Image (tube, helix red, strand yellow):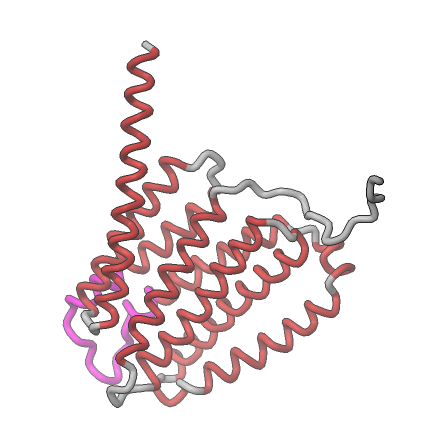
Amino acid sequence: MFIFASINKGRLMLVNKILKVVLVLLGISYVLLQGFALQIEGDAVSAVAFVLLIWLYMGWTKRKSKLFILFLVVFAVAQVLGFLACFRTPVPEGQIDYLYFLTNILSIVSYTVLIVKLFIQLNFKKVLSQLTVPIIILVILDIFCVTLISSTTKSSFTYYEYALEFTYNAVVMILLSFALINYMYRNNYKSMLFLLGSIFIVFSEIIQLAYYYILIDGTNSNLGYIYSFFLVVAFIFYYLQSQHAVSEPIPAYTDDPIDA
């Protein structure tokens, strides 16, 4: 019985390693495909990669988070719909692109799930008492950044599309702010990894806006590599942080006496 258990455990570990290698290869392929502007192939690779990432997380993570699973699932569905959108008939000008709205709304929901996950883990009485000034500064910066970023693409959208993009940008910036507050409050390895993932998400989303809506004269060829690379790195950090349990804050300084 012990031998069979060891064999099964060995097989599971082998599958785990194979999955990780496949995901790394898919990530590299995605970056290259987006860099060469092969949108359909890149979206296909992205959809497969996120399905495998969900399998990896659910199959080999000891401390699973229901909210993190929900985040991965909703984001993966958005990626799959983005891939399927490549095969539809073009939407006539003046008509509503429902798939565009649905895909972006799902991405907004996925990021909102991460915000909720952080929100319910924070002790806001302590956070507000300890980080009042940083929180005020972050709110001001969020309003400024979202307004500035959204205004650069205003001419490319209809009223409702602009409202959706503004909401999308706001949610991404709020996610980054919560990640920074969480790191300043907890001061541990898990919160640092989550913050790094959120930083790369924000960079990826901003560069992606420029890639699709601002630089349209052929000067944006390298941006495909950059935003896709940042997206891959962001999810590497998100996966790594998911392997650590939520812990109590670590004091930045201590008054313990030094032993002689």
Left/right of residue 193 with respect to residue 131 in the rendered view:
left
Q: Is residue 5 magenta?
A: no
In the displayed structure, would residue 216 be above or below residue 55? Answer: below
Look at the picture and state if 83 lies above or below 94. Answer: above
**Location of residue 210 (image quadrant):** bottom left
Q: Tell which of 44 and 77 is nearer to you.
A: 44
Tell me the quarter of the image containing the C terminus: top right
| Residue 189 at x, y percent in the picture | 57, 49
Query: Quick check: 130 above or below 63?
Result: below
Q: Which residues are magenta?
A: 80-103
Q: Residue at x 29, y 15 (%)?
A: 4
Residue plotted at (82% across, 40% down): 259
> Which quadrant of the structure image shows residue 30?
bottom left
The residue closer to the viewer here, 163 or 80, is 80
> Which residue occupies the extreme top position in the image?
1
What residue do we see at 52% from left, 42% from top?
244
Tally of marks = 0
User: In the orientation shown, which residue stands out farthest toward the front?
Assistant: 260
Q: Inspect the magenta stretch and tell me whether residue 94 lies in it.
A: yes
Q: Residue 246: where, in percent of width, then height?
A: 58, 43
Residue 123's spot in the image, x, y percent?
Answer: 70, 51
